[in-house]
Image (cartoon, rainbow, N blue to C red):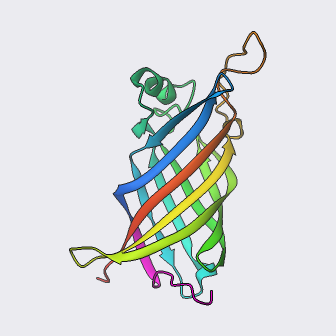
């Protein structure tokens, strides 16, 4: 970590108003369809030994927005996320590999009641002091998941081959975190 300036050890709460958890899938195997979740909460606990750090995130699945109300209702339905039965998704880290300002955060992602291991490619974008005296650390992350691994299997076969909705979904995260004040 020579030369890298990382956030100080402590608990950094996700600022929900400055957290963007987005996803991209394919429609008709060609068109990119994007969406995001607006209800994202949790914390990153940065340890003195950065590899001992932890991440815990909760996503309110009903907060999905794709720019199309009809599609959003379908995403919330029992055919897809089934938010009535599974109102939240979670990510809990299991290990952290870090070098400089980038790393891999390994963890358990639970969606639709199914837990699978995933790896987030993470970068630390920097830190700032906000106008109210709070310390903020900014992180970016990305991963790719197969939605069928989480039992989200609804689809329609296309006459010309392929399926209506891609199995592979790219997830990108941009978030600000705020250092929790010691009480």
- What residue is shown at x 68% (from left), y 30% (from top)? 166
Q: Is residue 9 magenta?
A: yes
Q: Is residue 54 magenta?
A: no
Q: Nearer the viewer, residue 68 or 31?
A: 31
- Image quarter for residue 98? bottom right
- What residue is shown at x 59% (from left), y 86% (from top)? 49
Q: Is residue 96 left or right of residue 183?
A: right
Residue sticking out furthest to the left: 132
Percent of width and height locating residue 12: 41, 73
Percent of width and height locating residue 93: 60, 65
Answer whether residue 147 is visible to the viewer in this image: yes
Q: Main secondary structure of the magenta part?
A: loop
Q: Nearer the viewer, residue 20 or 146?
A: 20
Compared to 82, does 91 lie above or below?
below
Percent of width and height locating residue 115: 65, 49
Compared to 37, does 26 lie above or below?
above
Span shown in magenta: 1-13
- Image quarter for residue 100? bottom right
What quarter of the picture does the C terminus occupy?
bottom left
What quarter of the picture does the N terminus occupy?
bottom right
Q: Nearer the viewer, residue 155 or 83?
A: 155
């Amino acid at each position: 970590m020579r030369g890298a300036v990382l956030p100080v050890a402590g608990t950094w709460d996700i600022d929900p108003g400055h957290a963007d958890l987005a996803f991209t899938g394919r429609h008709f195997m060609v068109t990119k369809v994007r969406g995001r979740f607006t209800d994202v909460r949790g914390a990153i606990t940065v340890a003195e030994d950065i590899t001992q750090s932890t991440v815990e995130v909760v996503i309110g699945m009903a907060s999905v927005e794709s720019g199309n109300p009809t599609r959003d209702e379908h995403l919330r339905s029992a055919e897809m996320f089934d938010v009535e039965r599974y109102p939240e998704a979670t990510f809990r880290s299991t290990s952290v590999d870090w070098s400089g300002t980038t790393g891999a955060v390994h963890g358990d992602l639970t969606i639709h009641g199914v837990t699978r291991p995933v790896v987030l490619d993470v970068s630390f974008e920097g830190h700032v002091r906000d106008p109210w005296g709070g310390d903020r650390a900014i992180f970016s992350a990305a991963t790719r998941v197969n939605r069928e691994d989480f039992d989200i299997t609804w689809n329609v076969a296309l006459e010309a081959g392929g399926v209506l909705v891609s199995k592979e979904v790219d997830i990108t995260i941009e978030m600000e975190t705020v250092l929790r004040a010691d009480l």
